[in-house]
Image (tube, rainbow, N blue to C red):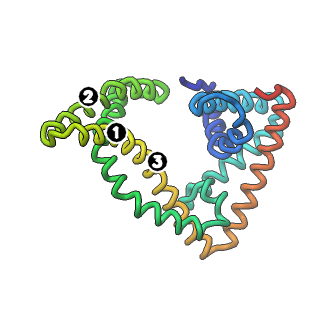
């Protein structure tokens, strides 16, 4: 599934809205029975349509909001922060302690999953980059290649474990651990980045508490305008 935007400027605005407001929208419309992937795809489609609506019908309202979002995200990027971390800034200390505990406990499982899944995970991306430079087409290429590459690698690994171990129960457990380990890596690695952002934010705001207040006020203003835009768009089009 590929989302098509009209130009780079529109794509940038859609990404900014998605980055800041996607979780709020998913929470608002979580009662739908669609799968997570389908819900995300439908949501991005709705964001694209909403952006086009406000660009045409309410440019004087939407243009300043675009600028505010771009400046806000640029400021966060310059400071090495993320909106997710800033939104949880009032709970930094408790979060950091929990994160440290999870990082320590999960590290052995991360290395296990990484060592067993790195090659079949990275090869589809390498081949897709060789086949196409278009980001929109690389994702389905990677998915298709992964369908074949993962079973091939897992087959060789299982054969080696059975050949040297001669234990079917052990081989079966190893087979179960391969995809579980891979999914854990996909969860653990972004978790380390969130911890890094939270740690940097805590240090920064400890040194410059006024900066935290300024960013939070900027964030609150943007989210207030996004809430207003959501209500207006739904009043015109109706909930999807």
- Residue wearing tag 2: 152
Picture quadrant where residue 154 is located? top left
Judging by the rendered image, the residue that carries numbered circle 3 is: 187
Q: How many marks?
A: 3
Figure check: 45 above or below 84: above
Can residue 233 be seen at all in this image of the molecule?
Answer: yes
User: Which of the image's four quarters has the N terminus?
Assistant: top right
Q: Earlier in the sequence, mark 3 or mark 2?
A: 2
Estimate the spatial distance between the alpha carbons at disc 3 and disc 2, rounded to whole Å.
23 Å
Outermost residue toward the left? Answer: 164
Callout 1 environment at 10 Å: few (<14), some (14 to 19), or many (20+)? Answer: few
Residue lying farthest to the bottom in this orientation: 207
16 or 93, which is in the foreground?
93
Q: Is residue 65 left or right of residue 192?
A: right
Q: Which residue is mark 1?
A: 176
Q: Residue at x 80, y 39 (%)?
A: 229
Residue 4 sits in quarter? top right
Between residues 87 and 116, which one lies in front from this camera angle? Answer: 116
Q: Between disc 3 and disc 1, whose residue precedes?
A: 1
Q: Are marks 1 and 2 in contact (CB under 8 Å)?
A: no
Q: Is residue 22 above or below residue 50?
A: below
Mark closer to the observer (1, 2):
1
| Residue 232, numbered label | none
| Residue under the image location 15 percent in, 39 percent down | 166
Q: Is residue 191 above or below residue 11?
A: below
């Amino acid at each position: 599934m590929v989302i098509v935007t009209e130009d780079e400027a529109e794509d940038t605005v859609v990404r900014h809205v998605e980055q800041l407001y996607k979780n709020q929208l998913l929470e608002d419309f979580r009662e739908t029975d669609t799968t997570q992937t389908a819900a995300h795809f439908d949501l991005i489609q709705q964001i694209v349509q909403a952006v086009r609506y406000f660009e045409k019908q309410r440019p004087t309202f939407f243009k300043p909001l675009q600028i505010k979002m771009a400046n806000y995200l640029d400021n966060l990027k310059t400071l090495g922060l993320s909106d997710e971390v800033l939104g949880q800034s009032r709970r930094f200390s408790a979060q950091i302690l929990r994160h440290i505990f999870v990082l320590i406990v999960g590290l052995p499982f991360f290395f296990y999953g990484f060592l067993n899944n790195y090659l079949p995970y990275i090869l589809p991306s390498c081949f897709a980059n060789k086949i196409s430079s278009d980001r929109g087409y690389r994702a389905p290429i990677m998915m298709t290649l992964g369908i074949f590459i993962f079973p091939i690698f897992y087959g060789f690994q299982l054969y080696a474990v059975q050949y040297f171990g001669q234990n079917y129960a052990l081989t079966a457990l190893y087979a179960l651990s391969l995809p579980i380990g891979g999914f854990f890596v996909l969860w653990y690695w972004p978790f380390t980045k969130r911890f890094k952002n939270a740690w940097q934010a805590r240090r920064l705001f400890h040194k410059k508490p006024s900066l935290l207040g300024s960013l939070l006020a900027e964030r609150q203003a943007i989210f207030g305008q996004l809430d207003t835009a959501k209500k207006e768009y739904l009043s015109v089009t109706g909930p999807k």
